[in-house]
Amino acid sequence: MAATYEAIATTALTSGTSYTFSSIPGTFTDLVLVTSFTVGSNLDLGIQFNGETTGTNYSQTYLQGNGTSTSSGRGSNQNQIYLDNTGTSTASNLYEFSVMNYTNPSYYKTVIGTCAVPSLGMQTISGTWRNTAAITSMRLLVGGGGFTSGIATLYGIKAA
Amino acid sequence: MLNNVAGVLGSPLPPAPVAYFESISTNTLGSNQTNITLSSIPSGYKHLQLRYITRNNRASTLDGLYLRFNSDTGANYSDHQVRGDGTSASSAADVSSSLMLASLVPGSTATGNVYGAGVIDILEYANTSIYKTMRSLGGYDTNGGGQMGLYSGNWRSTSAITSITIGSTDGSGLLAGSSFALYGIKG
């Protein structure tokens, strides 16, 4: 039986403030990105699709706990989906998120996922890219000092 | 074949391993339906994972997505939730319920083209020595509205799960385009 859960591509995160997975095949049902990395300064990790780096077509709702309290918030009309609200850590960060039915032209693209930033907290987010186009590229971005070490792997899950 | 990735590693990816994560069934609604039942679930896996994208037909901006197992409509379900609505976090529970809440999803009056998404894990679904436990991550965002939550549920039955019914908690049903993909994980 052909593999249902396949690694599409993997990349090191050792420098720079962004990495792009391009030419994503349209043969899967869902995409899953798993990444663990360190950064030079504590700024949020974001995601953009299909080269859309400007405009206001991204938003997210989050739920988080920081070891002291729980809270919820959202961001609207943004140029990226922020995958955390706590910021990243210079020590350690682990993110996993899915993009469901990423090629379906009938609805906007929904991202759901979790992140663990041990020094700051944990979060779950749901984000929307208000575009019905199939996703063909995915760009991870972080500000400030950029990535200093780590890895990101993009997986595809194919439904029957 | 690797894609064109900026900063790709020099080593190729290893060969695909023996499949432990297999697709069991996929159901995409071509029209609105009251609910959907994933039936004849084989017993040969260790765990189940349900990945979905959906929108309900309730005339509201949100609605509950429920699960039932093996057509059991008795008061044999309970669940706990930690949710965020973009303003505040909250927690709730249902006990002795006739259905199990798995997530909150957009209703029919939510922003158009927005569907809720989630991943539901049912561990040890065929183990006849234990009650069945579900965990779920689900939510949606409408650019000014939305929900995000973590859910756990329990079905007080030791029967192996052979079917899963999915529907809207107020009975209004699921909208066309909703899609539910069931996977089996071998252990």
Image (cartoon, coloured by chain):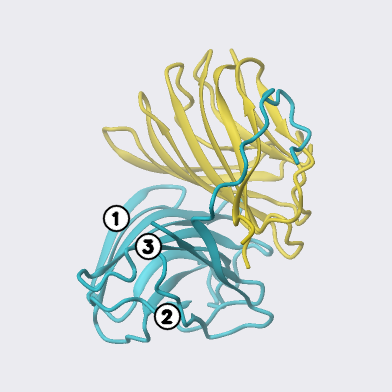
Chain colours: A yellow, B cyan
- On what subunit does the disc labeled 1 rest? B
Residue A111, image x and y in percent? 59, 49
Q: Label 1 vs label 2: CA separation?
A: 29 Å
Secondary element at image label 2: loop
Which amino acid, by three-letter code, is at mark 3? Lys
Q: Residue at x 46, y 16 (%)?
A: A90
Q: Residue at x 76, y 57 (%)?
A: A132
The reply to whether discs 1 and 2 touch (Cβ–Cβ < 8 Å) is no
Residue B44, image x and y in percent? 41, 70
Looking at the image, residue B170 sits to the left or right of residue A149; the answer is left
Q: Earlier in the sequence, mark 3 or mark 2?
A: 3
Residue A92, image x and y in percent? 43, 22
Secondary element at image label 3: loop
Q: Give the position of the N terminus of chain B as an image quadrant.
A: top right
Please check whether the numbered discs 3 and 2 fall on a single chain.
Answer: yes
The circle on residue B91 is 1
Q: Nearer the viewer, residue B100 or A23?
A: A23
The circle on residue B163 is 2
The reply to whether discs 3 and 1 touch (Cβ–Cβ < 8 Å) is no
Which amino acid, by three-letter code, is at mark 1? Ser
How packed mark 3 is, by other alpha carbons closer than 10 Å (few <14, some 14-19, many 20 or more), is: some
- On what subunit does the disc labeled 3 rest? B
Q: Earlier in the sequence, mark 1 or mark 2?
A: 1
Secondary element at image label 1: strand
Q: Is residue A139 above or below residue B183?
A: above
Q: Which residue is mark 3?
A: B46
- On what subunit does the disc labeled 2 rest? B
